[in-house]
Amino acid sequence: MSAALLAQACGTPTLDLADAPDGNYQLEPSHVRILFGVPHLGLSTYWAQMTRAEGTLQFDPAAPEASVVSVKIDPASVMTGDAKFDQELQGSSWFDSADHPEIRFVSTRVVRTGETTGVVTGQLTLLGVTKEITLDVIFNGSLLHPFEQRRALGFSATGTIRRSDFGMDHLVLFGIGDDVKLMLEAEFILRE
């Protein structure tokens, strides 16, 4: 399919929540990015990502505040661009992916702050510790997915957590920051 035909088939996402059907949506694994950044010696923010996740979204456009999102992330999918460091991050001083093979987030509250923005509060479980976190979320729109022929929704989210709250305090005193910036990009597709 040519680029012009593909663009025509895709159309432009709508930001009108009423155009998005209610129902259960599945996270599209090839269109999710989970990035995290940690201050490094006060010189820069070191960014990495997790590349494998699965999840669901129960979405109600008439009452988006009633929506519920649940996501599981594989910490063994951590990717920094340095394979040796990726292996180190999977070890017991960091993500301990052998003993804790899943990071989980389940929303508990959604508050709209604008037409396409909101704050999602939920329970994050990391290293066996569960804490409440909040994410600022932007609804990027919905459209009929050109290949799946089902409705798709897109979201961006940002937030900050303290890794020591979850017991991950390795090298905090050495200058590897405690505050972790989160950036998430996700697409969900309506289940049949």
Image: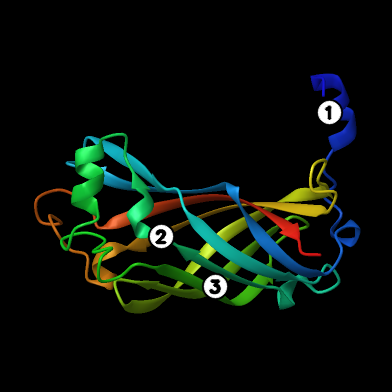
> The residue under label 3 is which amino acid type?
Thr
Left or right? Give the position of 8 relative to 43. right
On screen, residue 112 versus residue 101, left or right, reads: right
Does residue 6 sit above or below 137 in this rendering? above
Q: Whole-percent x and y of residue 48?
A: 35, 43
Q: Which residue is mark 3?
A: 121
Q: Mark 2 and mark 3 in contact? Answer it, CB < 8 Å.
A: no
Residues at discs 3 and 1 in contact (Cβ within 8 Å): no
Q: Position of residue 162 (x, y in %)?
A: 31, 63
Dot 3 crowding, Cα within 10 Å, few <14, some 14–19, many 20+? some
Q: Give the mark nearest the N terminus, 3 or 1.
A: 1
- Residue at 84% x, 69% y: name it: 22
Disc marking residue 74: 2
Q: Is residue 11 visible?
A: no
Left or right for 191, reference 82: right
Q: Extreme left residue here?
A: 174
Disc 1 designates what residue? 7
